[in-house]
Amino acid sequence: MTSTAIGLPDRYRPLDEVGPTETTATGVIHCWRAKDRILNRDVAIRVHTPGGPAAREWITRALTAGGLATPALAMVYDAAEGSEGAAPGGAAYVVNEWIEGRTLAERLAEGPMPEREARTVLRRLAEGVAAAHRVGLAVGGLTPETVVLRPNGLVGLRSVPAASGSVQGDVAALGELLEYCLTGRRPGTAPAGRTAGMPPDLAALVRRARSTEPGAGLSSVAAMAALLAERPRTGHTADPQRAPDESDSGWLRRLRERREEERSAGARDDVAVDPAPTRDASGTASPPLDARGLPPVPARRHEDDEDDLLPLSADRDDDRDGAVHARDHAPAQERRRRLLVVGLPLAALAVVIALAVYLGNVISPDDVTGDQSPVPSTPSSSAPPAGGTAEPDDTPALTISGASVYDPFGDGDPDNPDDVPLSFDGDPSTAWSTVTYRGSAAFGNLKDGIGVLYDLGSEQALTGLGVTGTAGATVEVRVGDEAEGDLDSYEVVADGELGDAADLSFDEPVTTRYVLLWLTGLAPSDGGFSAEVAEVTLTPAG
């Protein structure tokens, strides 16, 4: 088919028609994949029939979108209003960036997405739509057929902009896409508000996005993107079955809080007397209640002071008239006497221990040995001159002064950053780990890898690394001189697999300050793929 057949300039050669036909109030829009003959690149061309004034509003929206630069929205390269006829060069058209990848509809035909993947896809898409809203453009056309999953893990909307749209319509469409990603139910095929099987926070987000009630919906797409970014980390997920307020009754919660207050307050010097119990209509005594309607909490019992515990029951064998006899606490003078009897020996013991530690630090074993050894008649040739000091060892200590997660291809939310120090704390039972990725050992096909960048504090000479970690995970050892360089700025000096005691030796010694342990492949774990780095040790040169 020639470009003139659909009313396009000769610069664009149509290849095939893609995507659904968009019917509007002013006409029909067809989308074509085409070749830009001048720049020799594929583009997406949408043709509005008829052209002229009927397409003017759409072309104006396209010119507004031309000022956007976000990977989530296809860039607008060209737009023309044309004329009402379909003569050559007379059609209204918009030329978009062609986005490679498979559509969201094709991906969801295989089944719902995991929660983490759905959050990432919708957050990135919402951030792009929010950028359009900031310049006054409602995008429209947010459907599974127009959302494309790029090969590099990013997301793109192919048809920008639609013939018409509204801000609230974009919010509702994103909510429907989120529900589709999590449940596999296409928007419009299930009753509105049905969110069974979805995480509670995302179910609430879908309801708010689709709500038309005043004050119940989302204020903006930017707010939706922010809520999607606030997800719990793997391994620290709250109990999804019930909210914290439903874990016990309010009475038990208040009682627990009161007991904590009593423990922190400790024993009191004043006399504590039980209030008189109350009796019900049958004459049975019941525990008295305090001002808050709670039963009294007993004081903590000590082994040497049985009388410090106030009575919990109002019944006494020898109480014929039903009255309760209160018992006093031990007098304050008795407590002080006990404190002196117990505290003074403990204080003396602490002083003795402190003196022993001090003398142990001041008088070293070398000093004692020197006093007992005979003084040589002539100084040894290897001994330092009198009054001098021995030459220090020039070999630097191989230490790691700090580390951080290195995730240049991630979404800005690195995997478990707080656990990185566990990978060089000297304890192989503790570890830093990636999160669990679904679908593929290649990080769920979301990125090329992730790593930990170790800062040695200064340049040190190394011949290798010893690593304890997840068996089967593959790694590269890279070195570089910058703390925040891109991946290619770090030179690969070794590679291999992790295990109980992997030895990643270099072909020749290197001198560097920064060592990057770059994970290139994960190992199977529960429900997906992950890797742990339990302990990293440096192998010195020489």
Image (tube, rainbow, N blue to C red):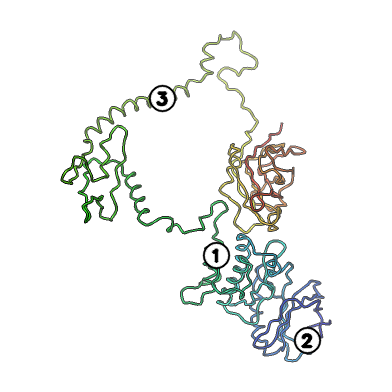
Query: Can you name the residue that lies furthest to the left here?
Result: 321
**Residue behind mark 3:** 353
Residue 77 is situated, as x and y percent measured from the top left of the image, at 72, 75
**Residue 91 falls left or right of residue 138:** right
> Is 322 above or below relative to 48?
above
Q: Residues within 10 Å of mark 1 (few under 14, many from 20)?
A: many
Q: Residues within 10 Å of mark 3 (few under 14, many from 20)?
A: few
Residue displayed at 62% across by 76% down: 139
Q: Quadrant of residue 29?
A: bottom right
Amino acid at pointer 3: Ile
Q: Residues within 10 Å of mark 2 (few under 14, many from 20)?
A: some
> Is 297 above or below relative to 334?
below
Q: Identify the element where label 2 is drawn.
A: loop
Residue displayed at 73% across by 67% down: 101
Q: Identify the element where label 1 is drawn.
A: helix
Q: What is the CA distance from the residue labelled 3 to the residue labelled 1? A: 59 Å
Nearer the observer, 71 or 197: 197
Nearer the observer, 213 or 66: 213
Q: Is residue 493 visible?
A: no
Amino acid at pointer 1: Leu
Q: What is the CA distance from the residue labelled 2 to the residue labelled 3? A: 96 Å
**Residue behind mark 2:** 89
Amino acid at pointer 2: Gly
> Is 110 above or below relative to 84?
above
**Residue behind mark 1:** 202
